[in-house]
């Protein structure tokens, strides 16, 4: 049965065919909340590196009515800084940012020296089927009381964030961009 965290890990193991993850801790800056853990998997589908957070869903937010989010990022890079950047955003913004589809969140600097991307966009995780993007981590016998919604985080350029702000997420999503390529030029 295990703890909430163990139930979450069991679910991620099912999604990732038992591939052993690495655990990257992010210390807490919030009194009363444990840190965030980045659970990192290398070379999953199509050679992507994928990381999930755990710890965002321990916080409260008024918009989180039917469950709480954890974040997911998949990129064509073996640089841990992508997953750690998402973990830092989850830790620092938990309780204040809803991480809703279409939210764009500036990181404040390029995530890695190999990329000029400084921003992330939240949307459905592209590597998961819609039915796989939520997990019930409720204690046994309390099904449906503790749902985690996995939210995809996509690295984007600052100019793309401005475009989304002006024209909307749908207009950007339909543009010509590779959501996994961290070295791509701006699409707009």
Image (cartoon, rainbow, N blue to C red):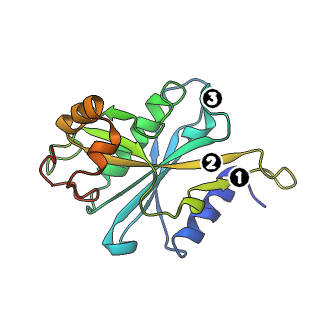
Tell me which label, 3 or 2, sits earlier in the chain: 3
Q: Is residue 58 left or right of residue 99?
A: right
Q: Position of residue 176 (x, y in %)?
A: 20, 55
Q: Residue at x 62, y 25 (%)?
A: 62
Residue position marked by numbered label 2 in the rendering: 148
Q: Judge whether 27 appears above or below 127 on screen.
A: above
Q: Residue at x 53, y 76 (%)?
A: 17
What is the C-alpha distance between the residues marked 3 and 2?
13 Å
The quadrant in which residue 12 appears is bottom right
Tell me which label, 2 or 1, sits earlier in the chain: 1
The reply to whether the C-beta atoms of the residues labelled 3 and 2 are less than 8 Å apart is: no
What is the C-alpha distance between the residues marked 2 and 1?
7 Å
Residue position marked by numbered label 1 in the rendering: 137
Residue 60: numbered disc: 3
Q: Nearer the viewer, residue 63 or 112?
A: 63
The image quadrant where one finds the C terminus is top left
């Amino acid at each position: 049965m295990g703890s909430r965290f163990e139930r979450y890990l069991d679910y991620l193991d099912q999604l990732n065919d038992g591939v052993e993850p690495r655990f990257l801790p992010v210390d807490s800056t919030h009194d009363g909340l444990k840190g965030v853990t980045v659970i990192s998997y290398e070379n999953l589908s199509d050679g992507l590196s994928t990381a999930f957070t755990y710890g965002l869903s321990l916080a409260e937010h008024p918009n989180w009515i039917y469950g709480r989010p954890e974040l997911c990022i998949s990129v064509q890079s073996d640089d841990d800084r992508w997953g750690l950047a998402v973990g830092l955003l989850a830790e620092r913004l938990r309780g204040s940012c809803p991480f809703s589809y279409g939210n764009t969140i500036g990181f404040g600097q390029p995530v890695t020296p190999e990329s000029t991307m400084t921003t992330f966009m939240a949307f459905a995780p592209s590597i998961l089927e819609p039915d796989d993007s939520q997990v019930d981590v409720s204690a046994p016998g309390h099904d449906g009381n503790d749902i985690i919604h996995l939210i995809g985080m996509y690295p984007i350029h600052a100019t793309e964030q401005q475009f989304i702000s002006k024209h909307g997420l749908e207009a950007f999503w339909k543009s010509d961009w590779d959501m996994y390529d961290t070295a791509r030029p701006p699409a707009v």
